[in-house]
Image (cartoon, rainbow, N blue to C red):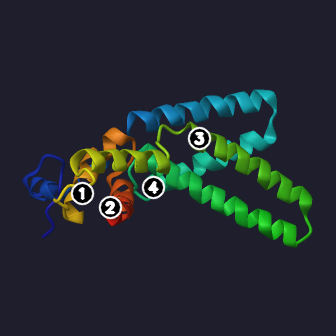
Amino acid sequence: MFKSVLPGSRVLSQYSSFVRLSSTQAPSKAYTEILAKFRTDLKQAMVAKNDTRKSTIRSILSAIKNDEIEGNPKTEYELLRVYKGLVKQRMKSIENYKQSDRPDLAQNEIEENSIIEEYITALPIKSESDIKDEIQKLLEEKYPVGGEHVPKIGDVMKLCGELAENWGTTPKIAKALASKEYNQYFKKK
C-alpha cells in the first residue's frame, strides 16, 4: 500500500526539482571586513572591561544578524540602514529617559549613540553632499548651461543609477538625489 522512500529512489528524485537552492547574495567585501572589525573590537572591549562599548557592539551585531535573517542584502549600504535605525532607537530612548528624569540612563544611551556614530563614519560610503557634487558634475559635462537640449529626467536618473557604484552609493539613493539635482539644475537654464 505505501511505498518506502529511500534516498536515491525514483520517488524521491521526482521531487528533487522542488528543492529551493539558496538564493542569497554573497556579502560584499566591505561587509565582511566590517564584521571582522566588530569581532576584534568586541574582543578589545572585553579585555579592557569597557561594558558600554561591549554591550553596544553586541547590540549592533545582534541587529545585523536580525537583518540577515530577514533576507536583506549583505552590503555596507544595508549596514548604514541598520546603524541609522539603532541611532533613531537610541534618540527615542534618550528623550524618554530625560522626560522620566533619569539622566544616568540617558547618559548611557548618549555614550552608546556616539559609539554607533563612530561606526557610521567608518563606513566606506560617500556622503549625500559628495554624491550631489558628482551628479552636478555629470549634468554640467553632459548638458552645459546654455545648451538647447534638456534631457528627460528618466534618462538622467538611469545614467545616475548606472554610475552609482562608482560614486560609492546605491542606485536607489543616486536616483533620488538625481531627481532633486535635475530640478535645481534645469531651473537655472
Disc nearest the viewer among 1 and 3: 1
In the picture of the structure, the residue carrying the numbered disc 4 is: 69
Disc nearest the viewer among 3 and 4: 3
- In the image, residue 52 sits, relative to residue 101, either above or below, namely above
Q: In this view, does 169 lie to the left or right of 127?
A: left
Disc nearest the viewer among 3 and 2: 2
Please state, as top left, top right, bottom left or bottom right, where the N terminus lies in the image: bottom left
Q: Residue at x 20, y 62 (%)?
A: 150
In the picture of the structure, the residue carrying the numbered disc 1 is: 156
Label 3–label 2 contact, CB within 8 A: no
* Among numbered discs 1 and 2, the one appearing first in the sequence: 1
Assign a secondary structure to mark 3.
Answer: helix
Please state, as top left, top right, bottom left or bottom right, where the C terminus lies in the image: bottom left
C-alpha gap between disc 1 and disc 3: 29 Å
Circle 4 Cα neighbour tier, 10 Å, few/some/many (<14 / 14–19 / ≥20): few
Q: Which residue is drawn at 86% across and 67% down?
A: 98
* Among numbered discs 3 and 4, the one appearing first in the sequence: 4
Image coordinates for residue 134, horizontal then vertical, percent: 37, 45
Circle 3 Cα neighbour tier, 10 Å, few/some/many (<14 / 14–19 / ≥20): few
Residue 186: quarter of image: bottom left
Which mark, residue 164? none
C-alpha gap between disc 1 and disc 4: 35 Å
Asked if residue 52 shows in the view, the reply is yes
For badge 2, the amino acid type reads Tyr
C-alpha gap between disc 4 and disc 2: 37 Å
In the picture of the structure, the residue carrying the numbered disc 2 is: 182
Assign a secondary structure to mark 2.
Answer: helix
Assign a secondary structure to mark 4.
Answer: helix
Disc nearest the viewer among 1 and 2: 2
Label 1–label 2 contact, CB within 8 A: yes
For badge 3, the amino acid type reads Thr
In the picture of the structure, the residue carrying the numbered disc 3 is: 121
